[in-house]
Structures are given as structure tokens and as C-alpha cells.
Image: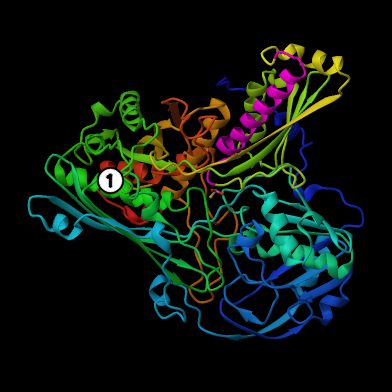
Amino acid sequence: MSQPISRVDGPLKVTGAATYPAEFSVPNLAQAFAVMSAIARGKITAIDSTAAEKAAGVLAVITHLNAPKLPEPPNAQKTQGIRIEQRIPLVDDVISYGGQYVAVVVAETSEQARYAASLLRISYALQKPALRMEDALKADKPPQQEGQRLQKTKGDLNTALQNPEFVRIEQTYSTPTETHNPMECSATIAVWDTPDRLTIYDATQYVKGVQGIVSHAFGLPRDNVRVICPFVGGAFGCKGPVWPHTILAVMAAKVVNRPVRLELTRHAMFSGTGHRTPTTQKITLAASRDGKLRGIRHHSEMVTSPVGWWVESCGAGSTNVLYDAPAISFDHEVRQVNIAQPSFMRAPGECPGTFALECAMDELAYALKLDPLQLRLVNDSPNHPMKGIPWSAKHLRECYESGAKEFGWSRRNEEPRSMKDGDLLVGWGMATATYPAHAGRADVKIQLNADGTALVKCAAHDLGTGQYTVLTQISADAIGLPVEKVKFVLGDSDLPFGPVAGGSQTTGTVGSGIARAAEDLKKKLSDLGADPARPDSFGQALNRVGMRMLEAEGKFEFKEDEKLAFQSWGAHFCEVRIDADLPMVRVTRWVSVMNCGRVVNPKTGGSQILGGIVMGIGMALEEETHYDPATGLPVTRNLADYHVPVHADINSIQLHFVGEPDYAFNPVGARGMGEIGITGAAAAVANAVFHATGRRVRDLPITPDKLI
Ligand code: MOS
């Protein structure tokens, strides 16, 4: 049942037949261009749209002066959707961040819309923006604190950290703003079918969420809005919430009384769809001479925007779960700057959190004169450090041991700068990976046809992750049919409820819904006198009673377990080679071992982990969004200036899975793979760089200037 089959949607993708939301052909479609503010803080004092309105093909210029008023801001809690930026677009003249939309131009063609947008003359009253964490102290609103999840403490930390018998390290680590940059830019096509019925083609990780938010925003019954998204060209979290452009597309379609397509430019993706907020993390570790951790403190600071609340939960995603100690505390402090709304990006919290904690562990290992791997092994714990309950199926020790063996870790000379290959410095580093087992709700319908095929339906998503394939495999297995006889349908809000494709939860959550629906199907088949163990007889059984099809359904909803904690685990081992004179870091070899419960498809699942590692290498060495310190506008706003790894940056990556299906977690036994690969990856690189050079870089990315 763990078959590495190729993507069932592969032929559609390679032939160009897969239709992405921006590509749907809609009659009479008008094109919109969203205009972004040129300042980060202030007010619009005037907009002269005369020239723009007269330009060829222009149908409308919508600004805060003439935008239709929406009802109350949609409340995400009430509407079953995600909205991080709370501001309603074009609601007033206030500018809170650079790149905030100030107008939408609608025209016959996208070129005409874009050209007309350049003719708009917008005047501003400029206020000095707060752009850095340091300046944010003076922001209008005091820092807020959020709930128990983000501030936890146990034991007597001060005593532990002051014990003279213990070895102590205390360091501050920082990560920059990073932007998602999926291949497909966000896009919405909005079609008002009637004055109160709407169809939206939207690049989203959550069709039911878009349905909820948009129906609420425009005062429509939920079922009057249909959201369609059969394919997503990558997302990494940036397509989970409903962002302003989706609301604007629907608004524009109302104004011009025609279907409207609004596709973001790559430039707009740097302010319009979230990013990973920068973090500063101070970590204090104390350990006894045997390496056992006695105290851990993890204080994280980050920024949010003036128009929404976001906490990058670094401590909650790392120190909360990774190592046990008698005294632990973590907390998060959030400030507000005039930069666009941050949001979730692949392993939000866990990713920067594990960078800091796993670098600190490396520093502690050197302070203790212990092998960094040995330090991890000494501190591997069977229990959740803060909850004190056992992990359901933790195989982290196997990850460490088999990864170390495959990598050849025992041949490592611990001394920094001791390993060389000709003129190149060689460094070996390792780090722990970890990501929570998240789960939600999924309703699944199975339609068994008299020709012996099955159609399985859920409003789930395939972000390019392989979910079409994986959910087809789980369905085929649960029903008992070969994969070729099963078709999985997703990406349409008319389908039964599916959760946001976030938190690495789709396989486990939707897969469990499939398992429940298959149980219902088997029961109905037995009631018909069929043998549920003989799938080749299903068609006959239906034909015998004159049914063209049989429908079954299943619902899954995860319930918190008070006796067990669920989490995925892994270990990264990384080799870097660095020219001592021109210190560009090259990652030359990588071994990862992962424990994620059941691996439904080692090929697509493996690709998720590999992709996470590649993104982690980008985080370690390349990725950083810069803002102009004068204007607050992003200056790295295309893929030439914002660097992500290309093929030439990536060498051998070996990956294995260990462990067994985690049936205590859910009926499929799968804990998800979308995010864990990136956790710990940047720390493994930074630790290898230290080993190669003797230079500890605590501030990502590790660019050559930091090693000279
Ligand atoms: Mo992912 S950052 O959980 O959408």
C-alpha cells in the first residue's frame, strides 16, 4: 500500500491541459490591475484619474472614493475561512504599509489596465513609517500578547540557569523576512452569474474558506458562492488566507457588471499575500556535564502589520516539543511596523524556531565538548516536555542513528576548520527536524459506479504536493479497487467539506474521511448482498439490483487526545564546502531521515521532504526580502533579486523514512509531510558552516560577506 506511483495528474500538467484558476476561459472577461501605494504610512490626499479613465479600453477606475461599500468586515471565526489582513481593501484613505492597494483599474486587456494604472496621479500626506523592530517600540499600539499556546513555563528556570555546575550558553539568532514565491502568482476570476450568485476561480489552499469569507463580505448566502480551484502552482501558505485582491476582483466584477480577472504580478506578491516575518530569538541553555539539558529559555520577538495580527510561534514550534528539561520557558513578543501583513509560510514558527534552537544546541555541544549528535541522543525524550504525556510513535532516535550511519558522521573530526578538500574547507553539521501532527475535519463521498469504477469527492486541494495521487491511492486501498479504477475530485466548494491545505494535514485528515466513507460503502454493499472483500463483484452486485451507482459518505473530525501527543520527527545531516578566500557556501551532500507515520507514497511524499530541504537551504544561504529604509517598499521584488535555490545550488540529497503508521493519531496512520523538511534544515547548514570555518553566523542568510 506504500506505492511510489507517479502523479495521476502528471500527464495533464506536462501537456498543459491542467487548468489553473487564472486560465479559465470565461466569456466577456475583463482584466483588472491592482495599483499599490508608493508610501508605507500616511494618507491619500488626492487621486486624479482623468487620464487613466480616458485611456484605451478602460472600463473603470476604482479607488476608495468610489468603491462600493461592503458590509461589516468578515469575521473569519464565524465564516469558516482565514483572513489575516483585517482591513477591507479601498475602505478609506489610510495607508498602513507599502504596497497596500490604492486603486483597481479594469480594462478590456491586462496591458490596457496596467498602462492606465500608470496614468493615475495619487498624492499622499506622508508620515514617517516604523520599519524595524527597534522603531516599532514607539508604535501606536502596545505589543499584544496571545494566549497560553505562546507563553509557557515549567520548573524553576532561574535556579537552573544560575547553577555553577552547569554549562550555559546564551545567544541571539535572527532570521529575515522571507517571501513564499510559488511559481503561480495569486489570481482570481470573479463571475457574477446573477445579482446574488457568484462563481470564483481562485488560486487558493482553501476553497471552503474563500466561499465563507467572500459570501460574508458581499452579504450572500454561503451556497450562492462557488469557488473552483482544481490546480495550484505552489503556495507554501500564501494562498491559505483570503487576501485583498480576491475581494477586489469580486468588487470590480460588480462595478463593471462583467466577469473580471485579477492576477497579481510577482512584484505584488511581495506585499499582497503575506510573508514570513523577521524574528530575533534569544536562547539560553544550561546542561549538566553529561549533556542533559537542565534549563531552556527561548524568547522570540517578531513584527506584525498595523492591519492584522500575526505571531511567528518560534518557541511554541520548537522548544515546546523538542527536548525535555526540568525547567523550560518560552514566550513571544510581537510589535507593529508599517510593512505588509506577515502570515504563515511553510512551518510557521517551527522553521525559524528550529533554526535558533538547533544552532544553540550545536553551540552547547561545543561548550560541553560533546559530539552534537551525542547531545541530541542524550536529550531524546519519550514525553512531550510541557504536557508530560508520551508521544504516540516517536522514532527520532532511529532517525539520528540511521542518518548518522548513512552520512558517515563517525568519521567527523570535531575540530572546526579541521576537514579540508584541497583548498576547500569542509564542514559537517546536523540538526533535528520536527513538525506537529495537525488534523481537522473532512467529509468525503464515494460514488461507486456499476461499471466497477469509483468517484471519490472532497473539497481538498493539491498545491503541487501530490494530493490527487495520494488521495486516489488511499481511496483505492480503502475501497479495494485498483488505482486506475478510482478518480479523486477536489478543489471545488460544491464538494463535501475539506479543510485548508495547511498544517500538513490533508493526507491524514482527508484520508481518514475516505476511510470512514469506505466503511459506509462496505456496509451498504453487504446490505445489497455483495461481498465487500471482493471488489471485482461490486459492479455485478449493483447491476443485479438495477442500480447505476451507490453512494456512501464518511466524516472525520480529529479529537484532541489527553493521553498521547502527536508529532513528526527527523534528522538532517549536511556537508558544506567553502572556498576560504571567497567564502561562498556550497551544500555538497545531504542525508535526512524522517519519521512521519505512514508514508502513503514515498515518491510524492519524498518530494515534499526534498522540497522542504531545498527551501531550507535557500533560507540558510540566500533568501531575504529587503525593504527600502526610506520608503518601506520591498526592493527585492522579483526572482532576479530575491534568490531561491536553483538546480545548480543543489547536490545529492538522500532521504529515508523510519517508523510505522501512527494509527493512534488517525485511521490512515499518516502525520503529514508538507512542512517538516524545512524545519532544522537551515540550522544543519549553519552548523556545518561553523564546523568548516570556525565562524558562527547567527543571522540568516549566511551570505559571503558574513564569512569574510
Ligand atoms: Mo502551510 S504554511 O501550513 O499553509
Q: Which residues are magenta?
A: 503-531
Residues packed near mark 1 inside 10 Å, few (<14), some (14 to 19) or many (20 plus): many
495 or 63, nearer to the observer = 495
Q: Position of residue 669 (x, y in %)?
A: 50, 30
513 or 343, nearer to the observer = 513
Q: What residue is drawn where x is 22% and y is 41%?
A: 416
Q: Is residue 47 part of the magenta span, yes or no?
A: no
Question: As drawn, is 287 to the left or to the right of 474?
Answer: left
Quarter residue 127 falls in: bottom right
Q: What residue is drawn where x is 28% and y is 45%?
A: 690
Q: Which residue is mark 1?
A: 690
Magenta segment's dominant SS is: helix
Residue at disc 1, secondary structure:
helix
Q: Is residue 507 part of the magenta span, yes or no?
A: yes
Q: What residue is drawn where x is 56% and y is 67%?
A: 340
Q: Using the rendered image of the protein, determine whether residue 580 is visible from the camera's viewpoint.
A: no
